[in-house]
Image (cartoon, rainbow, N blue to C red):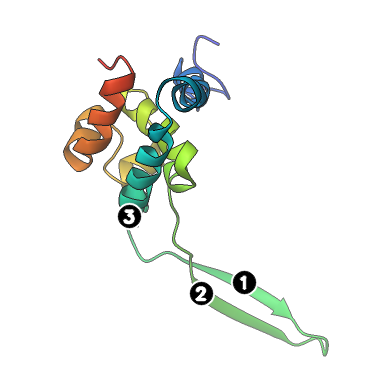
Amino acid sequence: FEEGVGGGSWKPFQLTVHEMTHGADMVIRQLIDPYFHYQVALLWEKHADKFLIQRQKQETYRWTAILANGRQVVREEQAPERYCYAAANRDEFLAECHTIAQGLHERSDDYKLCSLSTPEELGKAMPDVVALLRAYFNLP
């Protein structure tokens, strides 16, 4: 585990911080501040689109369909938009933003393409998210 989890695709401590954030989220909203759930939901709705992966070029994919009569048809379509995991829902938004704020997503290609892979980039793009994280978590 010295290189991280999953053959090094997860930096050391990255998965732990992510999953522990889910646990802390439940404790905060159940025992400390029920409004926390709503605060994070509002921030997710406000910022989720910032996690759209910016394409470096026009991405397309090509596929071949074989019709019932044996004729082949080649189609080329634009690849669908892709989002980082942080955009999936309120809970993953919180966990991934916390992981970014801890400096543990700096090697993540998807987050680099969103320009949201470092604590500095997160702070510049979403100061309200960082302020909420600082209120409940110990950030560097």
Inspect the image, locate mark 3, and give the three-letter code of the amino acid beneath it. Answer: Gln
**Residue 84 in picture, x, y percent from top left:** 43, 45
Query: Regarding mark 1 in the picture, which secondary structure is present there?
Result: strand
Dot 2 alpha-carbon crowd within 10 angstroms: few under 14, some 14 to 19, many 20 or more = few
Residue occupied by mark 2: 77
**Residue located 33% across and 20% down the image:** 136
Q: Earlier in the sequence, mark 1 or mark 2?
A: 1
**Residue 112 in picture, x, y percent from top left:** 32, 40
**Residue located 26% across and 22% down the image:** 134
Inspect the image, locate mark 2, and give the three-letter code of the amino acid beneath it. Answer: Glu
Image height of 105 relative to 50, above or below: above
In this rendering, position of residue 121 left or right of residue 12: left
User: 86 or 4, which is in the foreground?
Assistant: 86
Residue occupied by mark 1: 63
Residue 98 placement: quadrant: top left
User: 108 or 135, which is in the foreground?
Assistant: 135
What's the distance in space between the residues labelled 1 and 3, CA to CA? 23 Å
Residue occupied by mark 3: 54
Is residue 32 visible in the rendered image? The answer is yes
**Residue 57 in picture, x, y percent from top left:** 33, 61
**Residue 131 in picture, x, y percent from top left:** 22, 29
Q: Earlier in the sequence, mark 3 or mark 2?
A: 3
Would you say the residues marked 1 and 2 are in contact, meaning their CB atoms lie under 8 Å apart? yes
Inspect the image, locate mark 1, and give the three-letter code of the amino acid beneath it. Answer: Trp
Tag in front: 3 or 2: 3
